Image: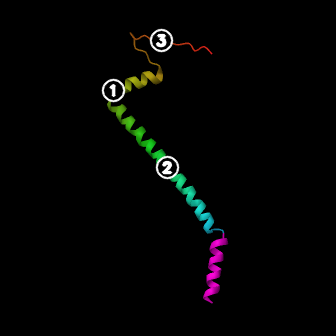
């Protein structure tokens, strides 16, 4: 009796819809997704640090705005380069 039950359970584990092979494939997927999540969390922390630094430092904020928006102060000269292909 126990042998039949054991055989049934082994067959069910190996060949059912939720079998062992799918479990191991899903483990690989879970590990890859965890790695991506950790990379994104690290990037988020770096961006948050930069934002806090930018909020507290007026000079950095000014330089960032100038760089991103091509802002020019009154007495400042800007040199434009023409790219020749």
Mark 1: secondary structure: helix
The magenta-colored residue range is: 1-16
User: Magenta span has 64?
Assistant: no
Is residue 44 depicted above or below 9 in this figure? above
Q: Earlier in the sequence, mark 1 or mark 2?
A: 2
Q: Which numbered circle lies on residue 37? A: 2
Residue 32 horizontal/vertical position (percent): 54, 52
CA distance for labels 1 and 2: 33 Å
Q: Circle 1: is it few (<14), some (14-19), or many (20+) Cα within 10 Å?
A: few
Q: Could you tell me which residue is drawn at 41 percent across and 39 percent down?
A: 46
Mark 2: secondary structure: helix
Question: Which residue is disc 1 drawn over?
Answer: 58
Which one is in front in this view, the residue at disc 1 or the one at disc 2? 2
Residue 42 horizontal/vertical position (percent): 44, 44
Q: Could you tell me which residue is drawn at 43 percent across and 10 percent down?
A: 77
Q: Circle 2: is it few (<14), some (14-19), or many (20+) Cα within 10 Å?
A: few
Q: Is residue 77 left or right of residue 13?
A: left
Q: Could you tell me which residue is drawn at 62 percent across and 65 percent down?
A: 21
Q: Earlier in the sequence, mark 1 or mark 3?
A: 1
Question: Which residue is disc 3 drawn over?
Answer: 79
């Amino acid at each position: 009796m126990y042998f039949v039950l054991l055989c049934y359970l082994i067959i069910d584990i190996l060949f059912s819809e939720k079998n062992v092979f799918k479990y191991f494939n899903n483990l690989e997927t879970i590990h890859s997704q965890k790695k991506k999540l950790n990379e994104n969390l690290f990037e988020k922390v770096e961006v948050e640090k930069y934002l806090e630094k930018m909020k507290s430092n007026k000079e950095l904020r000014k330089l960032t705005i100038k760089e991103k928006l091509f802002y020019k102060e009154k007495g400042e000269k800007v040199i434009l380069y023409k790219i020749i292909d």
